[in-house]
Image: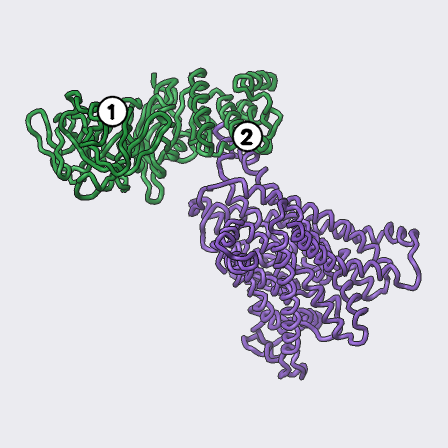
Chain colours: A purple, B green
Amino acid sequence: MRMKNAVRLGFCAIVLLFTLSPLIGFFATTSRLGGAEKTTNDLWQILTAPSTFRSLSFTLSQALVSSVLALLVGIPGAYLVAKYNFPGRRVLLALSAVPFCLPPVLVVLSFVLFYGRTGWLTKLLTLLSQSLGFSNLGSTNGFLYGFWGLVFIHAFYNFPIVIQNVGKVWEQLPQSREEAARTLGAKRLEAFRVGTLPYLLPSILQSMSLIFLFCFFSFTIVLVFGSLEGSTLEVDIYRALSFNGDSQKALVLAAIQTCIALGIAWALARSGQGASAMMKDYGATRPRKRPKRFAVLFVVLYSAFIGVFFIGPLLALTLEAFTVTDSPGGTPRFGFENFVRLTGRGYFQSENLLGLSLAHSLTVSTIAALLAIGIGLTIAMAVRRQKSSRFSTILTTLPMAISPVLTAFGWAIISGTISVTDRNLANNAAMILAQSTIAWPFVAKSVIAALDGLGLQKYDAARTLGASPLKATIRVELGEIWPSILSAAAFAFSMTIGDSNIALVLGGGQETLPVLIYRLISSYRFNEACAAGLILAFLTGIAFFFKEKPNGTA
Amino acid sequence: MEQLDIQDLAFERDNFELRASLVLERGQIGVLLGPSGSGKTTLLRLIAGLEQASSGKIYLGGRRIDQLPPEKRGLSFMFQDLALFDHLSGWNNLAFGLRQHHVSEQEIAQQTRKLADKFQIFDLLSKKPQAMSGGERQRLALARALAVNPELLLLDEPFSSLDAPLRRELRGYIRLRLKENGTTSLHVTHDVEEAMDLGDVLFLMRKGRIVAQGTPKEICAGPPDAWCVSFLGLGWLLPADSIDSQGQTARVFCGKQVFVIPKNHCKVQKDASERTFLFCSQEGLALQSEGKLHDKSLTENLPAPWQGNLLEGRIQRIIEGRNRKRIIIDTRSLGLTGDLKGPDGFLLPFELTAPEGFCGKEGDWIGVRLASAQCWALPTNA
């Protein structure tokens, strides 16, 4: 048994080393770049520079405001999915895959199309004001390109996490504590404060820290929308290394970023444990009701709000993909020309950009996803019989504290050292390794949750019926949780194929589909970007299709 | 004096319908007893104001409360999961209700100490509920519910998650405390032993209706129908084929057997379409020796009440008890005809306590006499 535990722990240590190696590679290399060792004085000067402070305060403030705003949008939704049965409830829950699977580059594109100066919302407001006979009701006036635009996008990109996490706990929470408070003399609000809020708090904190972490590492969105008012540490590290060659600054910023991210990851792990403890404590709960009177109004208003502000941009993206203008300023019409042009049969270019980038994306992402599934699945099996869940929580949360940009640079450094002759091969290897580093913790978390739900009884039953440990695991346990594994695999694929951060950082070589979209946006070819985006959305949509159903089927 | 008076309370949800009227005297412990889904908890929640009744009136201490919110009804509720506030210490849990009633902190401290002393929970005051044992949590929850001095205490199966010895101990403890305080209470359970042990008055519920009410003794002495007999485990039920009245007696035909009972023990309507049963209470059963089964001297000179009404069957199992043996008779060997299922849909059980010195063994045939005075003819559902 000790031997088995040692093997398990050894494997976990190797995976941890694999995950941390790009970070180690990054720090080790950047501290030696520039031909001279850094002095403490140099580093202190960068640390105390106003630009560092500006970058840090912008990163923290946008992440904090974004996560609070996401909570404000998500908590009413969490209440609705926890308490009521209504058409669209499952759609709201399925949206929780959006922050993980919808590529940031598509978010950028769809929000520009919807909220931009000449976006769909402005068009809608103009149309509304004309039909009502008012003077112009207003326009979005390009609010996207600033601090509030950035936090708005972050909040709308991440609020489904709140619906999923808080809603799940809220649904399982019995009403008896709130009711006990009422029968002891408390009014509604006081009863909620003492009977419900303390039990929801861990899941609220968990959601908040997860969203904070995502916004803290936000790269593509900040690159496009936040640059006028400031930029995050993640973007500044990228700029320092890619454009300014300032490895000292990158080193200092990366150190600050990693320390803070570790702190948030610790808070995330703690609140996550608290949230799952809240869910384990209770048995039967009251079934969800059909909404009546005020609840119907609440459901309708919330659905309309989400429909306009969240689904609206995605709808705009779809419509723009099929919108064709034959000449600048001409009347738009529907057609497939945007797709055709991307295949090299249009008049802009002769190269089949779409085909090449799609093939490259599929190859790289499939390998990266397979690697992530392999690591995630093995880690889940290795940690599952640990008495304390703390170890598995640390193991799966720690990688989330590592910046995708640093991971990309780190793997580029390592793969460049290994394969110095073939730059393309080194680049692809770095991309695969970096993407799998980001994706495997999500696979492991999903499989661990499924195994926890399954319990050990079925495994033990198989053993007592004569199955070997391997057979009991493969035939019984994996057989039982295959919907979760399928869902995790789809999730990993969506994450890797939709990744634009790592692909943009590494640059060079054959471009991926998200990088193609980014390039099309940069050259104002929005409709073609939408066409490519629609294909990417279809591929990442696989995660939605395989998202686990409540009864455990895929 | 009436403390709780429920008049024609009605409630509907999905396919469930509840109709109830009941009266509870001051200081009485009432017990709502019934199987799962009979509406016991719903009735309790309606009284507490946690569900809204569609019609009917509820009076508590002469005051109409059915239109008031839960916090203004002047009652306490002890939940199945106890609903202790896990983030608050024992002290703050205890003081919560008093704070809601704007009692001064000085008085809260005084009352909390007094309660802690009375309920022997002084050591728990600084602990959080999760650090307490099952029994400690129960005592804290009861003390919290009684801290606000409620006019009525509602208890929703608070012992259901405990093991049998602790359940028995707490039952006695709660009854003692309620009687000491003179608190009127209504307790929900599906455990017959618990109901008999705890209740001054029982309200037997089935499918959203109160089908029988009275003291445990009254209910056991005159069950209204076979379902009540089966649910409470009061004695034997034999499916009756027909009933024939003659003078002061009635003859009940069960398969090949005929049983004579007093005519006024026949509670079956003449034109009843439901199945009817012959019920004999446990006290009315006597073992009759047959052949060389065991010492004849034990049963051969039976007193008059046990003359006639003989039923023969084979011993399926003998369970060795601590004091007495229990005999299980094979239902199919009794010579009964037709449907051998009881009103609850399960195969009718035939079990009796063996007399001292009983030496029969499994597979033996025995005779059981049913005392006429303890037999009733009952419908399935009254």
Q: Where is residue B90 in the image (x, y as percent from the top left)?
A: 58, 26
**Horizontal relation, residue B267 to residue A492: left or right:** left
* Closer to us: A357 or A37: A37
Tell me the mark number nearer the camera, choosing from 1 and 2. 1
Q: Give the quarter of the image for residue A416.
A: bottom right
Q: Residues within 10 Å of mark 2 (few under 14, many from 20)?
A: few
* Closer to us: B297 or B167: B297
Relative to A398, say whether A353 is above or below: below
**Label 2: which residue?**
B133
Amino acid carrying label 2: it is Ser
Q: Where is residue A90 in the image (x, y as percent from the top left)?
A: 49, 55
Q: How many labels does the image show?
A: 2
Relative to A170, say whether B107 is above or below: above
Say which chain tag 1 marks: B
Numbered label attached to residue B283: 1
Amino acid carrying label 1: it is Glu
Asked whether residue A170 is in view, the answer is yes
Q: Where is residue B354 in the image (x, y as percent from the top left)?
A: 28, 28
Q: What residue is rendered at 52% in x and 17% in y? A: B118
* Closer to us: A309 or A24: A24
Q: Earlier in the sequence, mark 1 or mark 2?
A: 2
Secondary structure under the numbered disc 2 in the rendered image: loop
Q: What residue is rendered at 27% in x and 25% in y? A: B355
Cα distance between the residues tagged 1 and 2: 41 Å
Secondary structure under the numbered disc 1 in the rendered image: helix
